[in-house]
Structure formats: structure tokens, C-alpha cells
């Protein structure tokens, strides 16, 4: 239903590409290398840098086992003190029209697994006045949970109720386009985000609801049957709202990275 493809979050690390070049001259980011515009393998270099950054996010995420019931640590040197979960405030879905159409709202959506993102492809177009990046991303599995509330009729059953939602999304793929412009501040070059677009797909989806209000087992069984039989169709219905949310999250992430790491620290002449 509310596909935890908050991947997007998926997204978060995707953005990492933009900052993926915080070169070793920045303390705490020595694991990153700078890429030369003149390098015929520039795109490969940028992809390696992005994956290096993602790997360090993953390494920090694994430390979560040392922080029971706490969020996992992130990369504080970039202003990120935690990695997961990635949180979205709410999403909506509507099926059918009229007063009895099914509507559902998902709130406090928390997704885990985005830190396993890998950059599987990267294309770059860099000029003196503009930077364009196209990234292909892969996330093996995202798990999400949320609170849901629904109303209306679903497969001839009155589906008004509330409870807990869970979802497992395997084989998440995303494509992200970033366009930015360089600008100077006190002799240093930075990037300002101009545009960010993205799309995504999920190979396998499992999801369901638990703890339905008033213990309505008939409603719970009907909802679980419907959403698992129609998971891809539900994802398609949710995509516009979900994509808008993910673009907002990713844009904020990229802007923060661009503001902290000078452009000339990750791309050199």
C-alpha cells in the first residue's frame, strides 16, 4: 500500500553521489577521492566515490546493534548523526470514486534498509556553468512500518478501521537526475541544486496490517488478502504522492551536502 519505497530514502543515499567527492583534505572524509574533469574515466570515479560514501553509511548503520532501541549513527562530519530509519510523515491512497470509495492514510512511516543502496550506473555532464548527474540505484530490501487509518468499501467489505501497517520491498531500483550550478563563496566553488527528478520500481512486495482496531479479524483478513494480491497496482496508485515525498527528502539531503562540501573538493580541473 504505502510502499516503503521511501527508498527514497533510497534516495537519501543516492544523493550521496553529489557529495560523494568530499576529498581527503576534509578531516573524517579521507575515504573519499577527488575526481578530475579531464579523467576519461570520470564517471567511474564518481560512481566509486558515491559507493564509498554509501559504504561508510552502511558501516555506521551496522553499529546499531551496539545501540539497542536507538537510531543508528550516521556521518556527523556531514551533519548526519543518524542513518536509519528514514521517516516520512504521511502518505495517502484512494481506490474508486464516490462516497464508498476506499481511502487509506499512512502516518509516521519508518523505513529501514536504505543504507544498503548501491550506485550501479552513473552518467555525468559537467561544464563550467552546470553539472548534470544521472544515477541508477539498487537497494536489495526495504522494510517499513506505519500507522494506518482507512475508510470505504474494499472487495465488498466495509473497510473502515485503523491499525499497524508493515511492508517488505525487495529488488528496489531507482533512477535519479540531478542538475546543479556552481557558485563562488569567498574564493571557493559550491553547487546549488537546480532540479532533482526520480523514479523507482520494486520487484517483489509483501505487506499487511496487524492489530486492526476493535480486533476485527474479518476486516484484517480481507485487507491482507487484497493488498498482497494487488501490491503492484497499489504501488502504481501511490507512486505520484510517494514520488513527491521522496523528491522533497532527497532534495533536502542534496542541498545540505552541497552547502557543506565545496564543489572543488570533489571535482577538480
Image (tube, helix red, strand yellow):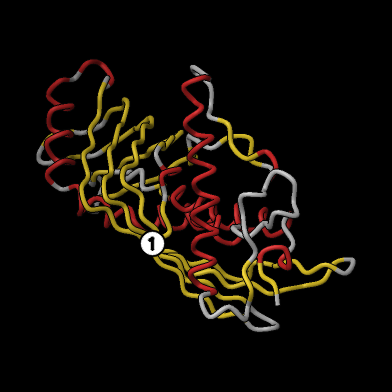
From the viewer's side, name the closer residue of 208 and 46: 46
Quadrant of residue 74 within the rendered picture: top right
For label 1, the crowd category at 10 Å Cα-Cα, with few meaning under 14, some 14 to 19 and many 20 or more, is some
Tell whether 183 sits left or right of 179: right
* Residue at 61%, 76% in the rendered image: 131
Determine which quarter of the picture holds residue 187: bottom right
User: In the visual, does 104 lie left or right of 85?
Assistant: left
Q: Quick check: 268 left or right of 82?
A: right
Which residue is at 22% across, 53% downward? Answer: 203
Instruction: Indicate the quadrant containing the N terminus: top left, top right, bottom left or bottom right.
Output: top left
Residue occupying image coordinates x 51% and y 27%: 63
Depth check: 42 or 121 in front? Answer: 42
Q: Quadrant of the C terminus?
A: bottom right
Query: Residue 18, image x and y in percent?
Result: 59, 62
How far from the left and from the top, in percent, is residue 144? Answer: 36, 36
- Measuring from the top left, give residue 124's x and y in whole percent: 52, 76
Answer above or below: position of 59 versus 43: above
Q: Quadrant of residue 19?
A: bottom right
The residue under label 1 is 120
Mark 1 secondary-structure assignment: strand
Amino acid at each position: 500500500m504505502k510502499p516503503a519505497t521511501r527508498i527514497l530514502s533510497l534516495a537519501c543515499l543516492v544523493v550521496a553521489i553529489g557529495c560523494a567527492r568530499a576529498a581527503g583534505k576534509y578531516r573524517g572524509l579521507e575515504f573519499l577521492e577527488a575526481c578530475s574533469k579531464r579523467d576519461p574515466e570520470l564517471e567511474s570515479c564518481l560512481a566509486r566515490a558515491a559507493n564509498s560514501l554509501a559504504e561508510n553509511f552502511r558501516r555506521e548503520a551496522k553499529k546499531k546493534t551496539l545501540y539497542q532501541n536507538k537510531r543508528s549513527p550516521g556521518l556527523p562530519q556531514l551533519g548526519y548523526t543518524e542513518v536509519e530509519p528514514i521517516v516520512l510523515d504521511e502518505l495517502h491512497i484512494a481506490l474508486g470514486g464516490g462516497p464508498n470509495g476506499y481511502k487509506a492514510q499512512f502516518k509516521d512511516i519508518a523505513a529501514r534498509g536504505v543504507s544498503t543502496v548501491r550506485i550501479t550506473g552513473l552518467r555525468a555532464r559537467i561544464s563550467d556553468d552546470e553539472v548534470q548527474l544521472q544515477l541508477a540505484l539498487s537497494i536489495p530490501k526495504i522494510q517499513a512500518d506505519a500507522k494506518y487509518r482507512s475508510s470505504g468499501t474494499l472487495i465488498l467489505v466495509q473497510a473502515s478501521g485503523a491499525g499497524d501497517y508493515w511492508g517488505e520491498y525487495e529488488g528496489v531500483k531507482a533512477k535519479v537526475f540531478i542538475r546543479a550550478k556552481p557558485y563562488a563563496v569567498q574564493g571557493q566553488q559550491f553547487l546549488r541544486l537546480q532540479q532533482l527528478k526520480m523514479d523507482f520500481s520494486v520487484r517483489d512486495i509483501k505487506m499487511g496490517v496487524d492489530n486492526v482496531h476493535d480486533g476485527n479479524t474479518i476486516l484484517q483478513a480481507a485487507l491482507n488478502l487484497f493488498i498482497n494480491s494487488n501490491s503492484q497496482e497499489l504501488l502504481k496508485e501511490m507512486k505520484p504522492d510517494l514520488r513527491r515525498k521522496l523528491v522533497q527528502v532527497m532534495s533536502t539531503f542534496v542541498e545540505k551536502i552541497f552547502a557543506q562540501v565545496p564543489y572543488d573538493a570533489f571535482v577538480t580541473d
